[in-house]
Each structure stands twice: as C-alpha cells, then as structure tokens.
Image (spheres, helix red, strand yellow):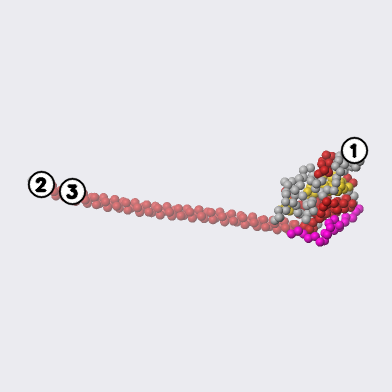
C-alpha cells in the first residue's frame, strides 16, 4: 500500500511537471504567434503608409502637371492677345480721322455727363475719375461721317435745324448761314410743321436738333408728320424716335461748334455746294487757346 502510494505521488508529480511544461510551451507558442502577428501588422501598416505616400505623390504630380498645362494655355492666350492688340494699334495708327484726335479732346466733344442712359451706353468708352462718362472717339468719328452721309440725301431747303440751348446759338447761326438751312434758335414755334393754318407754317423733309430734351417741341412735331430726325445726343439722352444719332457733348459751346463745323464741312463736300465753310476758329471762340482737358 505504501508502495502504491509512492507510485501515485510520482505519477502526480510527473503529470504536474508535464502540465507545467505544456503550459510553458503553449505560452511560448502563444507569445510567438502574437509576436508574429505584430510583425505582420507593422509590415502591413508600413506598406499601407508607403502606398498612401505613393498615392499622394502621384496625386501631387498629377495636379502639378495639370497646373503646368493650364499655365501654358494661359501663356498662349496672353501671347495671342498681345499680337491682336499690336495689330489693332498698328491699324488704328494707320487709319485717318475726320479731325486730329487732339481736336476732339480740345473741343470736349468726347465728354458726356455723369448719367448714362441705356440708349447711349454703347457709345461710352469709360468713366473718368470724376465720374464723367467718356465717349469712344473712334465711334464719334464714324457717326459724324454716317450722319453727314444721311443728311446729304436732303437739299438745304428741305432741312430745319433747331437749338434752344444758348451754348449752340452762334454755331447754329453760322451753320444755317453757310449751308442755307432754315434754323430756329432759342425759341421754336410749336406747330409750324404740323398746322397748315398758321401763318408761319412750313414744310420740311428732315429735322436736325441739338438736344432731344431741350428741343422736344420740334422733335414731337417731326414725329407727328413722320419726318426723319437727326439729333446730337449726350450720354443722358434717350433716343427713341430718332433716325440718326450723333453722339457727343451737346451742352458745351466749343463742342457744339466743333460738331457743326465737321458736319457742315462734310455736307458741303457731299452736296458739292458752292460755299466756303469758315475755319474752326469762327465756330468756336478762342479755339487756338483751348487746351485738351486732362
């Protein structure tokens, strides 16, 4: 019995020893597995980070390439624009105008008002620092020619010119005397074109007014009898009902003098009138002493 007990104790000790050995081996295996798992995880993490960096680098390179392409396109557009402007400048320098550009500036024909109506917006080039509108001088030159061409379709005796504004009285009187065109200054007798019962009734085929607003009585008469109207229009004028728009400063004596001088000159040439158009200094007082506005 004692011997059996001793054998059992030996077996138990051996079992405990084996069990402890197995536990330590399992523990070692477990630790080894965990260690390998960590290594795999770290490796995967490094590869993912590397992949992310590569992807980010590729993205940056793509963006840089796109920006370079955009910059090249912009550079090409700038170059084309510069060539276009150069050609335009060269063309403008070669082109002749009815009068030197200095005379347009000297007369202040190119200066409008601070108000710009939708009707006159297309004739405006820019605003000055003091908010005054500035007409496009190239368009002024073109419209002067167009209006003179249109007016030349009518003989002098079929045209009436009206100017209520005092600034244009001298120029209108000279215009009327030089070309033989009937004029009304300061006051226009309303109805003389529409009422045959009036003693001063007259007929006309075209009306030329210096301002659609101040000369509106004559303008209304012309619309009633449906004859064409040519009008000097400032930036604050409305142009509905006007046949021929002559854009320009219609509030200044020197501007109105300059405009009527150019129109008279062109009209006389086109109609081949045997008349001498006075020099610009007779249309505008102190012309030689005038300086272009800054």
Instruction: Bin the neighbour count of mark 3 within 10 Å (Cα to Cα): few under 14, some 14-19, many 20 and up.
Output: few
**Rendered location of residue 161, percent (x, y):** 85, 47
Q: CA distance from mark 2 to mark 3?
A: 16 Å
Real-space CA distance between mark 1 and mark 3, rounded to the nearest whole angstrom: 146 Å
Question: Whole-Å distance between the Cαs marked 2 and 1?
Answer: 162 Å
Left or right: where does residue 1 sit relative to residue 202?
Answer: left
Residue 185 - label: none
Labels 1 and 3: the sequence-earlier one? 3
Q: Which of the two discs, 1 and 3, sits closer to the camera?
A: 1
Secondary structure beneath label 3:
helix
Task: Estimate the x, y position of residue 60 in percent, counting from the top left.
Answer: 51, 55
Left or right for 79, reference 46: right
Q: Are marks 2 and 1 in contact (CB under 8 Å)?
A: no
Residue picked out by circle 3: 15
The magenta segment is 274-294
Residue at 81% in and 55% down: 254
User: Badge 2: few (under 14), some or many (20 or more) residues near its Cα, within 10 Å?
Assistant: few
Q: Earlier in the sequence, mark 2 or mark 1?
A: 2
Question: Residue sitting at 18 percent across and 48 percent down?
Answer: 15
Residue receiving disc 2: 4
Front residue of 231 and 40: 231
Left or right: residue 39 versus residue 118 is left
- Which residue corresponds to mark 1? 197
Q: Nearer the viewer, mark 2 or mark 1?
A: 1
């Amino acid at each position: 019995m004692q011997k059996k007990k001793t054998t059992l104790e030996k077996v138990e000790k051996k079992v405990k020893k084996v069990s402890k050995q197995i536990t330590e081996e399992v523990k070692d295996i477990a630790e080894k597995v965990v260690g390998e798992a960590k290594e795999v995880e770290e490796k995967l993490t490094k590869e993912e980070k590397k992949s992310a960096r590569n992807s980010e680098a590729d993205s940056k390179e793509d963006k840089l390439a796109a920006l370079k392409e955009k910059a090249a396109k912009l550079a090409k557009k700038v170059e084309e624009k510069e060539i276009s402007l150069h050609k335009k400048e060269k063309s403008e320098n070669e082109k002749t105008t009815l009068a030197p550009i200095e005379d347009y500036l000297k007369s202040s024909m190119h200066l409008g008002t601070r108000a710009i109506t939708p009707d006159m917006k297309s004739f405006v080039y820019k605003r000055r620092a003091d908010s005054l509108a500035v007409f496009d001088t190239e368009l002024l030159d073109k419209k002067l020619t167009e209006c003179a061409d249109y007016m030349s379709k009518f003989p002098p005796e079929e045209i009436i010119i009206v100017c209520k504004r005092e600034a244009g009285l001298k120029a209108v009187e000279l215009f009327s005397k030089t070309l033989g065109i009937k004029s009304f200054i300061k006051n226009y007798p309303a109805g003389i074109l529409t009422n045959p019962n009036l003693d001063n009734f007259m007929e006309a085929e075209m009306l030329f007014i210096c301002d659609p607003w101040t000369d509106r009585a004559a303008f209304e008469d012309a619309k009633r009898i449906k004859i064409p109207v040519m009008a000097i229009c400032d930036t604050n004028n409305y142009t509905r009902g006007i046949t021929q728009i002559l854009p320009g400063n219609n509030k200044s004596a020197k501007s109105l003098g300059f405009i009527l001088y150019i129109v008279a000159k062109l009209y006389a040439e086109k109609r081949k009138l045997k008349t001498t158009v006075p020099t610009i200094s007779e249309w505008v007082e102190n012309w030689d002493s005038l300086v272009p506005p800054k």
